[in-house]
Image (cartoon, grey):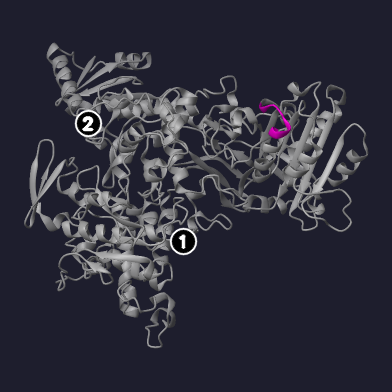
Amino acid sequence: MVKIKKTELNEFIEFLMKDYDVYSPADVGKKAAFKKIKSAFEIKHAITNTHLSPKDVFFPQSEVLFQYSDDGLKVPKREEKAIAVWGMRNCDTSSLLMLNKVFGDAHQMPDKDMYKDPYWKMKYDNCLIFNQACNEPLSTCFCNWFEGNPFAKKGADIFVVDTGDHFILEGISDKGKTFLSKYKAGEETTKVDLNKIAKLKETAESYLPDVVDIKPLFNKMNKIWDEPIWEEISAKCINCGACTFVCPTCHCFDVSDEGKGKKGQRIRLWDSCMFQIFTREASGHNPRGLSTQRVRQRIMHKYNYFMDNYEQYLCTGCGRCVQVCPVNLDIREVIKKVLDYKLSKNEEI
Amino acid sequence: MQQLVKKVKEIIKNKEVDVVIGWGRGSLPFSATPIFVETEKDVEKLIFDETCRNNLTTYLTKDKRRISKEYKKIGIIVKGCDSRSVVLYTVENQIKRENVVLIGVPCNGVFEKKKLSQLVEGKEILDFQIDVDNIIIKGRNFEQTHPLKDALCDPCLTCQYPDAPEYDYFIGTPRKDVNVPDAYKMINDFGEKSAEERWAYIQEEYSKCIRCYACRNICPSCYCPECFVDQNDPQWIGKTPEVTDSIIFHLIRNLHVAGRCVDCGACVSACPVDLDLRIMSKKVEKEIKERFDYTAGTDINEKPAMASYCENEKQDFIMG
Amino acid sequence: MCNCDNTYIPIPMKVEKIVIDNPDRSLRTYDLSFVNEEDENKFKYMPGQFCEFSILGKGESPFGIASSPTEEGLKFTVSRTGSVTNEIHYLEEGDIVGIRGPMGNWYPLEKLKGQDVVIVGGGFAFTTLRSMIVYMLENRDDYGKITVIYGARHPDLFIYKEELKIWDKRDDIILHLTVDKPVKGWDKLCGFVPAITKDVKPDPTSWCIVCGPPIMIKFTLPVLLEIGFAHDKIYTSLERRMKCGIGKCGRCGIGSKYVCIDGPVFSYEELKKIPDAF
């Protein structure tokens, strides 16, 4: 473990910047989001979660797939340096592991390289994740429903705890351990520090909501496809994409060309299953024309379909969608409603 | 509140309406949530207070294929701005006035969650209490008192129509005489700045847009079955979050709601990245007011500004 | 980063021949040839698979491959419905277009070996069925009796009319062509595909491939089940708005499946477990 004085963080970040492009929570207007920083002074040491998720670092809202012109196609390349992300909470670190199953591992199609996403891989492979303990979970947090914990280290290369005056860094993965061993300026940690961390963890955990057992959710979802509950849940949804855009795990996208004449680029853009045009076909036929069908798709994708394909839920309980929904369609309440729902056809679960 | 519950129970019992759209307690502090009340039992869930932020009339026109159920006669609880939206729908032939039953409620302004959050420097708010003209905001390790008006939505601070101009029933006492400060002060102040400063502000502000369309979808005046943004043949504008694309989206949206915006501020509250959306919409509103002496949604017998023509209209923008 | 690993990069193909399939010119068939030999060598496909047809500046649309792997180049039939297909219709012979693929799975040709096969098609969704028929005729000895039921709204709306005439004359393939309503000069069958299927009453021990507009599939399936076809011997191909083609972008999700990688070909056995597949 390495102990760094907060006042000396910049030295560490500069050391990190020698090998990495560093992203960190920073002010973007009135909100906090992950962006590329030039010095430690830009880091926002937010006590709460960032408003926008870090998925943007690896899966940007808009990304050039290639440029085209008379000279042919040109694929953008990444700069030499790999990406390091400072200040990620475990809900976000977990989300990257989920997204990597979709983009990186091509889990469903293991033998074929064509199912791996080169744009994701060139950023995600070789990245260094600083997973920072979440000292003060918000009232909208529910990571503990998904086996998460504010002090969990899963997915971290380096685990960071903010103890007030210091950051205490612990190498978790081989990559993280190797990197930390190269940094010589830190102090040794003491028993006092470890006690402090234990205390912080205890306090953080006390802020979490009561755990809801979500294991039965998958099976329950299988049985309620045709039930009126979806109309009840979706009635107030206005089908904007706020929830899906702030979500660290939502990953639907659109591919679109921009250009004039023979010059231009093909880009991919975040898209949302909430939008009416998402599935509309050129013929006018729309398999998910009703708002109810779209809300069901979003919820089912998170708590049923993804489980079917990747053996886990596509949600980390970060609570961002709960915070931004303009009509307070609270996904925690949806989960509870589904779990409590009594089937109308007397089907036994 | 009791009066409201009593009235709604009555009209549901008499089958005057199939459903009443109102507000219920939300899951977060400072939040109310839209509820669709169909039975007498559910009426008890209705609330009305400073947290009832949403303009519920948006559900009257939005995407007719939202849910499979179709209501013939809809009751809806309205503040002043919400009632103006219904007037707008009526003059624009989107609804038949006789198919909606409006229940007006006296509005003293509603909270803006974002302003509250700024008051306590972004700390999480867990509870609040109103003490006459003050609001006591509570969080995990703090308790702060602020003037109540600092917590209200910006549109509420200059609202000239707190009482529903159009209603079938009114619960409580209308506020009647409202003393309104200069509604366009923010626009005039902004206009004082140099063009460069204004452009820089607009660019910085709209560069944050993530194109989630929450502003459009929550907006009662945005009810096109297919928005220009979604059309792809021709594709009018780019869909990237680049600032030029975003500014064009917001500019065109504002032109589309010119003379139709009731300044309910729903877009501002809905925006997940806190854009200053009123800097555009209020400016357009001011122009419409000055040129056509028209205020959207205040007179059910008046033709919309953009759908009528008078010979004495100012035409300097054409003739130079 | 090497282009060859990047599934998002289209390969160039040249438009060799354009056939206008119907009098209102809304359907056109394109024969494409590979510009680069290495692309051609790598491009291995089977009947039922699809490609993303790319017009730079306009975007991409998914189309089933209408040619058979036994033929040279690729064939696509495009109906003019949206902005990309509109642009495709402006193409001229000699133009270069982009193709990504082949994507998705294919008809169960291995399982069909030695079996009787019934093919039911409707409208211009006949593309991959053509691929399949050409493939089976080319390997004729591998398959049993081949029966084709093909319907269109109007005689003009059949695609591959010249080939249909040739097949009609062959004795190793039985062709039932039908139009929705009687038309002067039409001497073949008349009626909707489900009704004709009922009349033809194909042998239920054979395998059946159904492909057409969703509404046709919806009403044909019960007929096949009634005749007695086994659930795992009925196959169909689904259409969705596939964008990425590699199971990521989320558009073509039906239940936990993605049409672009788990399909587009599904057996009825699989489909009945997926809610709202059509």
Kindly identify the amino acid type of the residue bearing the numbered disc 1: Cys
Q: On screen, B240 above or below B55?
A: above
Q: Is residue B234 above or below residue C210?
A: below
Q: Which of A197 and C157 is in front in this view?
A: C157
Q: Which residue is drawn at 52% across and 22% down?
A: A107
**Residue A270 higher or lower than B103, as above or below:** above
The answer to which quarter of the image holds residue C164 is top right
Q: Residue at x 78, y 51 (%)?
A: C157
Could you give the CA–CA distance between mark 1 and mark 2, rounded to whole angstroms?
40 Å
What chain letter is assigned to the residue under label 1?
B
Looking at the image, residue B319 sits to the left or right of residue C75; the answer is left
Q: Residues within 10 Å of mark 1 (few under 14, many from 20)?
A: few
Q: How crowded is mark 2: few (under 14 residues within 10 Å), some or many (20 or more)?
A: many
Q: Does the stretch in magenta take in C31?
A: no
> Within the magenta stretch, is there residue C230?
yes
Give me the disc on residue A137: 2
Element at label 2: loop
Quarter of the image holding residue C105?
Answer: top right
> What is the span of residues highlighted in magenta in the rendered image?
C225-231
Q: In which quarter of the image is residue A165?
A: top left
Identify the mark at residue B224; answer none if there is no mark. Answer: 1
Q: Which circle, 1 or 2, is nearer the viewer?
A: 1
